[in-house]
Structure formats: C-alpha cells, structure tokens
Image (cartoon, helix red, strand yellow):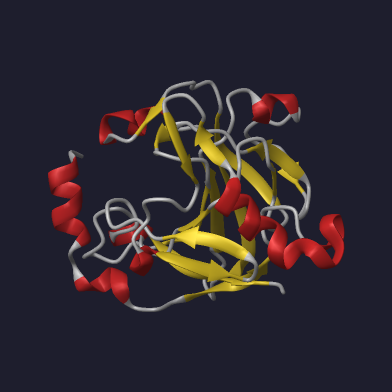
Amino acid sequence: MDMDEFRRLSALPMWYQVVESVLTYQYPLPRVQQLGKRWRTFWKKAAENHIVDEERAPYTLIDGIPKNELYELDGFWCAKSPESHIGPFVNAIDFLIPDGTPVFAAQDGIIVEAVDQNTQWGDDETFRDDLNFMSIAHDIGTTPQGKAMVETTQYCHLEAGSIRVQGLRVGMRVNQGQQIATVGKSGWTDRDHLHFIVFETDFHSLNPFGFQSLVPRFRR
C-alpha cells in the first residue's frame, strides 16, 4: 500500500476512539529498579542533552519537535508523529531515549516477528522498509466460542543485530522484563527513539488493515 492510500484510509474516524489495552504493561525501558530515585529526571535529561549526530546533525533528541507533539510520560520525554502515528498506529508512543538503551519485553509472550538485519535510516518515508523491529503476542484469554484472544506489542527502531545478540528468534517465549534488544536508529526516523505500540486484531468490515492500536495501560 502506498503512503497516499494509507493516509486516505487513516483519516477514517474509526481509528480515533479511545480503547485501552486489556493487559497492564511494564515500561519497555530501564526503570526504577535500575536507576533508583533518579529515574524521574534521568531519561528526561538524557533526551535534553543527548546529541543525535555530532558531525552531520548536532541536535538533541527534543530539538525541533513542536511543543504540541512533545509530551511527558511518567519521567520520559515522548513525541507524537503526525506523519506515522495515524490510523491503525494512532496510539503509538515514541520514547526519546539514546541509542544503545536496553529494550525489555513489556509482558510475557511469544515472539511472532523479528527483523534486525537493517542498517539504514533517514528522515524520509523511503526508509520505512529498513526498519528493525520485534512483535510479541500476549494471550488475553478466549472468546465464548473458544477462539484465542491476543494483544501484540511492537518495538521499533532497534539496533542491527541486537535481537540475535540476545539469542532470540520467532517462536520463542520471553518473560516480562527480559531484555529483547537495544535501541538503534533504523528505518524511517530522524533521531534516536523507541517506537512502542500495542495492537489488537480487528476484523471489522470497515478495517482494511485487520488490526488497530490500543492505548496501553502501564504499571507505575
């Protein structure tokens, strides 16, 4: 699907109803247990001071983001993206954190997708196929008809090779809080960050994608 068609379909009002996740998730990044009482300022200061590229583009992780797209979430600076956080991806969260930061599984589950061989990135939608990411399916029970119900978390802009370093592959089970990768620029991006999203399957006749994003409920 080309981007013009994606944007057209993403304008449908069905995407913009607030639906929360059934599961409660751990933040997918180092938190209180690793940093003690300093966690509320540590990640914000990291985003404010970390330089994206000393030679080509000397700006920090929060520089250039419009105020209406920058927000704080429990000690992290995060950003909205009017270009990519639309339609079935509207509830995605971009955590502004430096490359090399460990990424943890937000809940117990099974790895259903994993890509970590890409090394290219850039601020252009032509780089979208160069994305490194992992998707983890989480069981949330069964329907009255006995059909399995799942929510899926997805972790994007991972460092090349960082999934393999952890010894992980599709089909393996991971535990909440287990390291699954590290942050590293890949795909369509202009700065270091972890793109995190929770999906549910949606086979509504009006949904051309078969899934929609949920507002994640985090464990504080």
- Count of marks placed on residues: 0
Q: Quadrant of the C terminus?
A: bottom right
Q: Is 191 left or right of 203, judged from the image as shown?
A: right
Q: Is 95 left or right of 2, judged from the image as shown?
A: right
Relative height, residue 154 to residue 149 (above, below): above
Relative height, residue 132 to residue 192 (above, below): above
Q: Residue furthest bottom?
A: 18
> In percent of the image, x 33 and y 59: which residue is there?
88
**Can residue 211 be seen by looking at this rendering?**
no
Q: Quadrant of the N terminus?
A: top left
Quadrant assignment, res 43: bottom right
**Can residue 53 be seen by looking at this rendering?**
yes
Quadrant assignment, res 59: top left
Relative height, residue 175 to residue 143 (above, below): above
Relative height, residue 216 to residue 125 (above, below): below
Seen from the viewer's position, the closer of residues 25 and 137 is 25
> In percent of the image, x 59 and y 43: which residue is there?
50
Q: Is 49 left or right of 127, judged from the image as shown?
A: right
Residue 206 in percent (x, y) is at 21, 65
Residue 101 in percent (x, y) is at 68, 41
Residue 165 in percent (x, y) is at 73, 25
> In percent of the image, x 39 and y 38: which residue is there?
190
Residue 204 in percent (x, y) is at 29, 66
